[in-house]
C-alpha cells in the first residue's frame, strides 16, 4: 500500500537533489510568468486603446458598411462587400431576409458570432460577422505546433544545462577517487570558467594531500625499517638472559613489537591498492583448508562451503593472511563457547562472500564501524591482553579493498560475523 506514495516522495527527493532539474524548472516558470505578465499587460493596453481609439473607428467603419448596403438593403451591394472583404452579412427585415453565409443563417451561434449590427430606417437589421477566413482558412494544428515547439525548447534548455554542469560530474567522480586514496587520475579540465577553476583547485588540493600522505608513508616505512635492526639485537640479547618469568615477558613484548613493525610495513604496501598484488588463479576453498591445516589444526571450526564457488584471481599470500587473521580473531573470542567458529562461503549474484562467525560477546553497535580502523580496540571484551596489536582487521580490510571487495561486520547475536565480499569478475 505504501508503494504509490513512496514513488512521489522519491521523485520529489530526486528533483530537490538535481540542480539541473531545478534550473530548468526555474527557467520554465520564469518563461511562464513572463508570458502571463506580457499577455496581461498587453490586454490592459489594448483594452484601453480599444475603448479610447479603436472602438470609435470600428463603429464608424461599420456605419459606412451599413450605409453602402443602403436602405432598403441592396443584396447586390451586400454580396459585393462579402466578395471584397472577409466579412459575413445577414439582413433581416420586413422585405429583405438574406444571409451571405450559412453559419449566420439563424440560431444562437449566428447571433453570438455577429460582431456588430445596424438598424436601417425601413426596419431592417444588418448584422456583420467574420467571413470564410475564420471558418475555413484558420491554420490547423497551431496549438499542437506551439506545444511541440515549447517541449523542444525545454529539451534544448535541459541539454544545455546538462552540458553546462557536466564538470560537476567530473568533480564528484574525482572527489570519490581521492576519498579512496586513488590519485592516479586528476579531474579533467573541460572549460575555463568557474567550474573549471573549481576542478583546478580540487586537483591542487588532491596533489597536496597525495604529497602529504606519501611523505607520511615514507617516514613510517623508514622508521619501521630502522627499528628492525635494534629489535633483532634486543631479541638476541634477551635469549641470553636466564630463563624465568622476566625473560618470557621480555620475549613476548619483543615478539609483539616485531609483529607490529611487520604489520605496519604490510599496511603501507597494501595502501598502494591492487598494484601491489601478485594475483594467480586460485581455489578459494583449497586456500581455506590449507590455512586451517597449517595454523588451526584441531581447532573447533565448522566449514560450510558453497560448491558453486568459482576460481578466483587472488594474491594467495595476502589472502592467507586475511583468513588467518579472521580465524585467529574469531577463535580468540570464541573461547569457552560450546559452538565452534563457523566459516562459510556463498555465491550471491555478482558477489562472492566468505563469512567467519564466532559466538563470543560481540561488540557494541557503535563500535562496528570502527573495527577495521588501525589500532582500534573495542571494550574490555577485546583487549590487548587477549592478543594482537590492533592491526589485524585493518590489514584484512586493506586486502579486501585491494582485491576490489569490502569487509563488513555485524553482530550475529551471539558473536560477531565478518563478511568478505568480492566481485565475481
Image: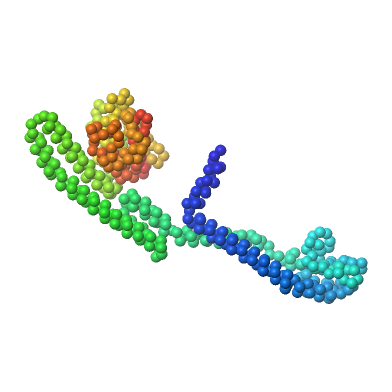
Residue at the far top: name it: 338
Q: Quadrant of the N terminus?
A: top right
Residue at x 8% of width, y 34% of height: 241
Q: Quadrant of the C terminus?
A: top left
Q: Does the rendering let one see residue 281?
A: no
Question: Camera-side residue: 144 or 115?
Answer: 115
Tag count: 0
Q: Vertically, is 335 above or below 43?
A: above
Provide residue 253's location: percent of width, then percent of height: 17, 36
**In the image, 151: left or right of 142?**
left
Question: Camera-side residue: 65 or 52?
Answer: 52
Q: Does the rendering let one see residue 376?
A: yes
Question: Camera-side residue: 158 or 335?
Answer: 335
Provide residue 11's location: percent of width, then percent of height: 52, 48
Residue at x 34% of width, y 43% of height: 405
Provide residue 178's location: percent of width, then percent of height: 33, 52
Residue at the far right: name it: 94
Question: In the figure, residue 76 lies in which quadrant?
Answer: bottom right
Residue at x 78% of width, y 63% of height: 113
Q: How is the image coloured?
A: rainbow
Residue at x 33% of width, y 58% of height: 203
Provide residue 395's location: percent of width, then percent of height: 27, 41
**In the image, 245: left or right of 409?**
left
Question: Camera-side residue: 343 or 331?
Answer: 331
Amino acid at each position: 500500500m505504501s508503494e504509490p506514495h513512496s514513488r512521489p516522495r522519491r521523485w520529489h527527493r530526486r528533483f530537490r537533489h538535481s540542480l539541473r532539474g531545478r534550473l530548468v524548472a526555474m527557467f520554465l516558470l520564469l518563461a511562464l510568468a513572463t508570458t502571463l505578465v506580457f499577455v496581461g499587460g498587453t490586454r490592459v493596453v489594448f483594452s484601453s486603446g480599444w475603448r479610447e481609439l479603436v472602438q470609435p473607428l470600428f463603429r464608424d467603419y461599420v456605419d459606412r458598411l451599413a450605409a453602402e448596403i443602403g436602405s432598403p438593403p441592396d443584396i447586390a451591394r451586400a454580396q459585393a462587400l462579402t466578395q471584397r472583404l472577409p466579412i459575413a452579412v445577414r439582413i433581416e427585415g420586413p422585405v429583405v431576409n438574406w444571409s451571405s453565409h450559412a453559419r449566420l443563417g439563424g440560431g444562437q451561434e449566428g447571433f453570438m458570432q455577429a460582431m456588430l449590427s445596424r438598424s436601417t430606417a425601413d426596419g431592417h437589421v444588418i448584422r456583420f460577422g467574420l467571413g470564410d477566413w475564420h471558418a475555413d482558412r484558420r491554420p490547423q494544428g497551431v496549438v499542437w505546433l506551439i506545444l511541440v515547439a515549447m517541449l523542444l525548447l525545454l529539451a534544448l534548455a535541459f541539454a544545455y544545462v546538462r552540458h553546462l554542469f557536466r564538470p560537476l560530474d567530473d568533480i564528484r567522480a574525482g572527489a570519490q577517487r581521492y576519498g579512496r586514496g586513488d590519485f592516479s587520475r586528476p579531474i579533467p579540465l573541460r572549460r575555463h570558467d568557474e567550474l573549471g577553476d573549481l576542478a583546478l583547485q580540487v586537483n591542487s588540493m588532491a596533489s597536496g594531500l597525495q604529497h602529504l600522505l606519501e611523505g607520511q608513508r615514507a617516514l613510517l616505512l623508514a622508521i619501521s625499517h630502522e627499528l628492525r635492526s635494534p629489535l633483532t639485537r634486543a631479541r638476541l640479547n634477551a635469549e641470553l638472559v636466564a630463563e624465568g618469568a622476566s625473560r618470557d615477558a621480555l620475549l613476548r613484548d619483543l615478539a609483539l613489537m616485531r609483529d607490529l613493525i611487520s604489520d605496519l610495513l604490510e599496511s603501507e604496501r597494501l595502501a598502494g591498492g591492487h598494484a601491489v598484488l601478485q594475483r594467480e588463479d586460485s581455489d578459494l576453498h583449497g586456500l581455506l583448508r590449507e590455512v586451517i591445516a597449517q595454523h588451526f589444526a584441531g581447532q573447533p571450526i565448522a566449514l560450510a562451503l558453497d560448491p558453486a564457488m568459482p576460481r578466483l584471481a587472488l594474491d594467495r599470500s595476502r589472502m592467507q593472511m586475511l583468513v588467518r587473521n579472521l580465524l585467529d580473531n574469531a577463535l580468540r573470542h570464541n573461547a569457552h563457547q560450546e559452538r565452534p567458529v563457523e566459516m562459510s562461503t556463498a555465491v550471491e549474484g555478482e558477489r562472492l562472500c566468505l563469512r567467519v562467525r564466532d559466538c563470543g560477546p560481540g561488540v557494541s553497535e557503535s563500535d562496528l564501524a570502527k573495527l577495521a580502523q588501525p589500532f582500534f580496540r573495542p571494550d574490555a571484551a577485546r583487549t590487548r591482553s587477549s592478543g594482537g596489536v590492533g592491526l589485524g582487521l585493518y590489514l584484512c580490510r586493506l586486502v579486501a579493498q585491494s582485491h576490489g571487495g569490502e569487509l563488513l561486520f555485524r553482530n550475529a547475536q551471539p558473536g560477531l560475523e565478518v563478511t568478505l565480499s568480492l566481485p565475481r569478475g
